[in-house]
Amino acid sequence: MKQGTLVGSRLSVLALTLSLWLVVTVAQASQVDNVRIWAAPDHVRLVFDLSSPARANVFGLENPRRLVIDLEDTRLNADVTQLDLSGSAIGQLRTGVRDGNGLRVVLELEREIEPRHFTLEPNDQYGYRLVVDLEYPGESAVEDPIDPIEAMIREQEIIANRGRVEADGGATPTPDPSATLRQAQQQAQTHPRRDIIIAIDAGHGGEDPGAIGPSGTREKDVVMEIARHLQNLVNEAEGFRAVMIRDGDYYIGLRQRTRIAREQKADFFVSIHADAFTSPRPNGSSVYALSQRGATSETAQWLAASENRADLIGGVDGNLSLKDKDEVLRGVLLDLTMTATLNDSLSIGGQVLDQLGQVNRLHRSRVEQAGFMVLKSPDIPSLLIETGFISNPDEERRLRNASHQKGLARAMFDGLRDHFHRNPPPASLLAWQRDRNRSTGGNEYRIQPGDTLSEIAVRHGVPVAQIKQANELNGDVIRVGQVLRIPSS
């Protein structure tokens, strides 16, 4: 073989090898196939859909304010010019090639932000994803936060109730003359007549669509519609006010949902969902309260796990944390508070379940209990309501129906309204109306500091059991300001 021919052959092999290397390299490079944006009151979330995992570097620049997102060995295969940036901190989004084979995304910012980012593994709806959150320092997560004065009044009630629970769990505290004087001064002041605050949590949202029905109906859309109907009913009722945990199509972590409810001093928290199962046969509505010792059925346990796993989308590990609770709460006080709150939850849940049974078939005839993370607030009665099985074709159609959505919302509101009319918080408008209309020799009694059920029963000559039955009490824990119906002796 001639030397020239040999050299040419070697060059051909080298060229072929180089070509194959380039093909493999291109094949291994990740692609951004889509970019989605979710704007919330306190943050904006960008989600990059990736064909394969990609290493990201995110950093800020000043003058002008920008956020840079560098993706190694990544190409852009999506049209980002059509992204709706309205309602977000992003004024403009630019992209370019970095170091020959990388992707650079530059966000021109219109306000101060605190960025964080994380990656997600593929799930049933999406592949690999890079999530970039731009959080707004100092902003509230709700559109219309509670008035500071109303928040102060509600905080005073919470402190009073904690003191009452602590007294129930230990020795009678020594009377404080200054506290007695302050109480007398407070009683002499004008009644606050505050609204009862209902925190409404539409489950899932944004990057998390929840369950998807046979016809493609997304749980996050259905429960948002039901939540808005419930919001209207609450705000239209005298003495009530709704706080929406999420007021649009964006995601909020499970622990943050309860944290928002506590920040807004909610009297009640309801999380709305649409159930799903591997079989299309199950149907009907369910109501869940917190179980301190696990689920009351295997189905409830499985469902709690699937709902709780959604918090991974928020970039957290999903473990319950008490870091956002009052640090001075002792373990025994927390247990007692949880018991009182759970009793209220079960009471409201039973009434809501009765009302739901009038508009939809019930999957369970009693209030179930499971370890849902959104129910783990020690001082707010909370329920998770599965409005129906979106995995059932017939119920999927009904859940899309506006009339059925309104009926479900009405059932929820009627149940909680009945409870609060019987047990209004002491500083609320409903409590003021009840006190005003109550005759001097009536058959009702408002609980005062230091009262116990047994003392009240002796004072009125009525057995404790009858008082419990008349007021649907599941235990002996009572709250300062609570109004008890005293049955005839």
Image (cartoon, rainbow, N blue to C red):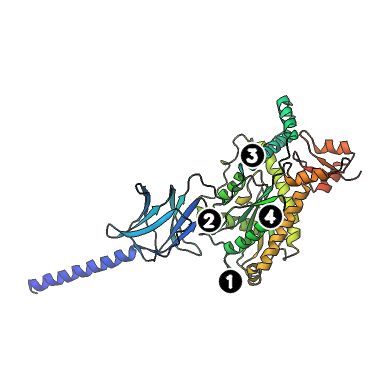
Which numbered disc, 2 or 3, marks the residue closer to the eye?
Answer: 3
* Residue at the image position 80 percent from the left and 49 percent from the top: 472
User: Dot 4: what SS?
Assistant: helix
* Residue at the image position 73 percent from the left and 61 percent from the top: 356
Residue 234 marker: 4
Going by the numbered disc 4, the residue's amino acid type is: Val
Residue under numbered circle 1? 214
Marked residue nearer the N-terminal end (2 or 3): 3
The quarter of the picture where residue 394 lies is bottom right
Going by the numbered disc 1, the residue's amino acid type is: Pro
Q: CA distance from mark 1 to mark 2?
A: 23 Å
Please state the horizontal and vertical placement of residue 279, each as a whole percent of the image.
62, 68
* Residue at the image position 29 percent from the left and 68 percent from the top: 23
User: Dot 2: what SS?
Assistant: loop
Which numbered disc, 1 or 2, marks the residue closer to the eye?
Answer: 2
Please state the horizontal and vertical placement of residue 49, each as a whole percent of the image.
43, 62
Marked residue nearer the N-terminal end (4 or 3): 3
Q: CA distance from mark 2 to mark 4?
A: 23 Å
Q: CA distance from mark 4 to mark 1?
A: 32 Å
Residue 251 marker: 2
Judge the density around disc 1: few (<14), some (14-19), many (≥20) Cα neighbours within 10 Å.
some
Check contact, mark 1 vs mark 2: CB within 8 A. Answer: no
Residue 383 marker: none
Residue 152 marker: 3
Check contact, mark 4 vs mark 1: CB within 8 A. Answer: no
Please state the horizontal and vertical placement of residue 301, each as a whole percent of the image.
63, 56
Going by the numbered disc 3, the residue's amino acid type is: Met
